[in-house]
Image (cartoon, helix red, strand yellow):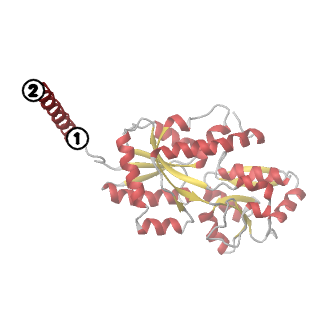
Amino acid sequence: MQISLRRRLAALAGLGSLFIAAVASAQAPAYPTKPIQLIAQQPPGSGSDAMTRVWADCAAQALGQPVVVQNRPGANGILAVSALKGQAADGYTLMSIGMSQMSITPYTYRQHPYDPSADFDGVAVLGTSPLVLTVPAGEGVTRLADLQKLAAATPGGLNFGSPGKGSPAHLLTTALLDKLGVAGTHVPFVGEGAGMAALMGHQIQAMTLVGGTAAPQVKAGKLVALAVFDNQRSALMPDVPIIAELLPAAADLARPSWIAIVAKAGTPPQLLARLNAVSEGCRSNASYLQRLQTMSVTLTASKPADVRAWAARDAAVWRPLIDKLGLATE
């Protein structure tokens, strides 16, 4: 009798728990019930902005609510990060963020402006894209060796551009020039597009660009691609050698860029899981695939925790390089 009574009580307790969970679920508001703001840390026309908008379009279809992109360029993502941190951690403000902001930018300042491991909750890593060292056409520079000779013959070395201080383009070009034994002066721009315009206008002598941004200008004969910072050649520019083919000592610079979606730290895990599921679903969307493939983006399966893991992995490489090159400033 006692055993039977205990079983009945346990069964009733279980039913009670299920009832409470069902009521709580019914009372929980659906998500999302209004448009989602997606902060882009680069200006319109950049490779990062293009990837952001492709994800926003696909996510909006799956979520049944608009995903509105807001560009907050400046200080290589610091302004965008500040905008995100000023919002509620409710899943209605997200940010597209790159390898630069997650594993480089904060460490180029002695007083870190933010903490990637504490200020963000990951949603998903969208994919990777190769970075390409480019120069303006018509300057007689068609090989990395030519650029090395030009830098050696130029007082003060090369003027090279980047989308901002602490960007992968900044670090990769600086590190490459260091390995080549030549000098260079960094010229930061607000976004990739502005730097590329200056490059094509012969106002600077070199710039590392995202592959999808560089390829159309290379094909149009306006830029010359010298090297791909990756372990394999780019499908968009198969004739351009990877950096290790040209300079084995620079093989450690084969680091493609990546883009992720993050939310403010403290966002409810169930919302992160919902957004991650949407992002994963986009990888089977034909339009999404086609648009990103034209940008030379390699799609990546990921979980929310992967965003911080990728950031920590790359920071372990970039932080010592920042220290070695003395790039940290006040």
Quarter of the figure with the C terminus: top right
Q: Amino acid at mark 1?
A: Ser
The local secondary structure at tag 1 comes to helix
| Label placed on residue 242 | none
Mark 2 vs mark 1: which is more N-terminal? 2
Task: Write down the residue under mark 2.
Answer: 1
Q: Furthest-top residue in view? A: 2
Residue under pointer 1: 25
Tell me the mark number nearer the camera, choosing from 2 and 1.
2
Q: Residue at x 85, y 57 (%)?
A: 151
Vertical relation: 142 (above or below) 115? below
Q: Residue at x 84, y 65 (%)?
A: 146
Q: Residue furthest bottom?
A: 220
Look at label 2 and name its amino acid.
Met
Which type of secondary structure does the marked residue at label 2 adopt?
loop
Residue 264: which quarter of the image? top left
Residue 198, compared with residue 6, is above or below; it is below
Residue 12 in picture, x, y percent from top left:
14, 32
Among the 4 quarters of the image, the one containing residue 110: top right
Residue 318 in percent (x, y) is at 68, 44
Single out the residue that lies furthest toward the left: 1
Q: Quadrant of the N terminus?
A: top left
Asked if residue 150 lies left or right of residue 304, the reply is right
Residue 180, visible in the rendered structure: yes
Residue 294 is situated, as x and y percent measured from the top left of the image, at 53, 69
